[in-house]
Amino acid sequence: MTRGADLAEDGPLVLCPDCSQYRMSVFGTGVYASVSSVCGAAIHRGIFGRSGGTVRVHKLKGRHSYMSSYAHGVQSQALSHWTSSFSLSSRWSHWDAVLSDDLLFSTGKKPLKKTTKPNVCSDCQLDIAMVIDSSNNIGRRRFNLQKNFITKLAAMLKVGPTGPHVGLVQASGSPQTEFLLTNYTQPKELLFAIKEVAYLGGDTNTGKAIMHTAETFYTQENGGRRGHPRVMVVLIDGWPSDDLEQAAMLARESGINVFMVSVAKPAPEELGMVRDKDFVQKAVCKDNAHFSYSIPSWFSTTKHVKPLTQRLCSLDGLLCSKTCYNSVNIGFLIDGSSSIGDSNFRMMLDFLAGIARSFDISDIGARIGAVQFTYDQRLEFGLFDHPRKEDTINALRRISYMSGGTATGAGITYAIQNLFRRTGPGRNFLIIITDGQSYDDVQLPALEGQKKGITIFSVGVAWAPLEDLKAMASEPKEGHTFFTRDFIGLAEIVPAVVRGICRDFNDKN
């Protein structure tokens, strides 16, 4: 039997005979390793049955992690790596048809006129799981219209290696992962992969699909990126067969923004058949109308592509992704006075690096900045200078010890003026670390910072007076004041400070 590796050109038609007597090896799902049988892959993809047919083969680059799956009577195998790949389409289809009119998938006819869709997401760095309806309820024709709709969404999202990543799961009797977030980071490959997804049929177990996606999809092993908002777009035709509440709760607790796109919602006479009439409100990230979107028919989806894409890219509206680990600005105000000494100063930097390491630092995640003070002040680096965690930790390690007096109040004023420019409830935090008494007033500068929405934690070492520490700290004082008798003890405080930041963030958001 012909393998993908046997074909020298891209796009040839392969005629497969009756395959019922042949044993065929298939590696992958949607995209197949070139060692795979072309005819076996075509049966697995659902292009034709074992009686044979004609299929077009598209050559692709090699990749890591070919997924195994069972489909249409063929069990494909997993493969960790292969040097080249291929995908398949039926003989009439070709790439230029992917972004055409809504009737393309149901009729196979090309539109008379193409239009270029504007891109509304110039900097939309999300990890998006598309959960599509593949049940008996939607049927093959509307299933193809659904695929056409999500190809247009994907095109407008501007998918790319550093932009949005998109993966896809089918909701049926049992959920089926079609491809992961990092399987397709080039627009052409992604849109072709969506087009080639085969219809499953079965129950509308949307709850199972949400649970499966929340548990497996966003791990780093499967391509989830630290600090990037997690979005799950759930499309449903009619209503689910199972319960969504527990699955949606898990998604929310995992920081996943669930969008429910309901198409052809139940008519009044059908409501008696709906297991839970409030399934949309229970499934979404927040029941505030931002995360639910209703479309009257699959035949009218085109005009809904742009407004839905704008909602997905509204970073300020993605409430469930806003955890303390990826949405805070933390400023470090570091005492560089002569009483500390160089070796103790290094232990202070280790302490601050431990705090920084606990957060998802990225260009759209948590931010860290640092100021050192004596009688003078020095901006070591700002909140926007180092958008990667490794760079932030290295910048902390490189801070040189100033040595001098202790003017903590002036240091607070300087840090507030030079670090915090982005505002938001419970988002800005200042960690002050000092080993002694300040020569100037600390209470008024700290109050000014708190009035501007900055939560202040004070960390004292050795001779730092408790009165000063409490005067600087936010309310309640006991929860924002820390003290250790020696610098070695700073390491033990790290978890408590991180918990305090998350407690305050959660209380205010």
Image (spheres, rainbow, N blue to C red):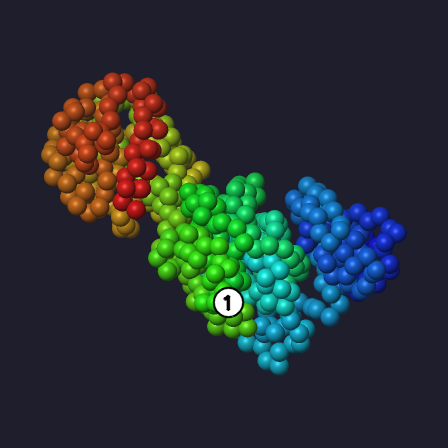
Residue 501 as seen in the image, left or right of residue 233: left
Between 321 and 473, the one nearer to me in the picture: 321
Residue positioned 48% across, 46% down in the render: 247
Residue 329 as seen in the image, left or right of residue 248: left
Between 400 and 509, the one nearer to me in the picture: 509
Crowdedness near tag 1: few (<14), some (14–19) or many (≥20) residues, C-alpha within 10 Å: some
Q: Which SS class for mark 1? A: loop
Residue positioned 33% across, 33% down in the render: 499
Residue 365's x, y, as percent?
Answer: 39, 46
Residue kind at label 1, given as amino acid type: Ala
Residue 124's x, y, as percent?
Answer: 45, 57
Question: In the image, is residue 308 above or below residue 372?
Answer: below
Residue 489's x, y, as percent?
Answer: 31, 20
Q: Pointer 1: what residue?
A: 264
Residue 469 as seen in the image, left or right of residue 55: left
Q: Quadrant of residue 227?
A: top left
Residue 306's x, y, as percent?
Answer: 46, 68
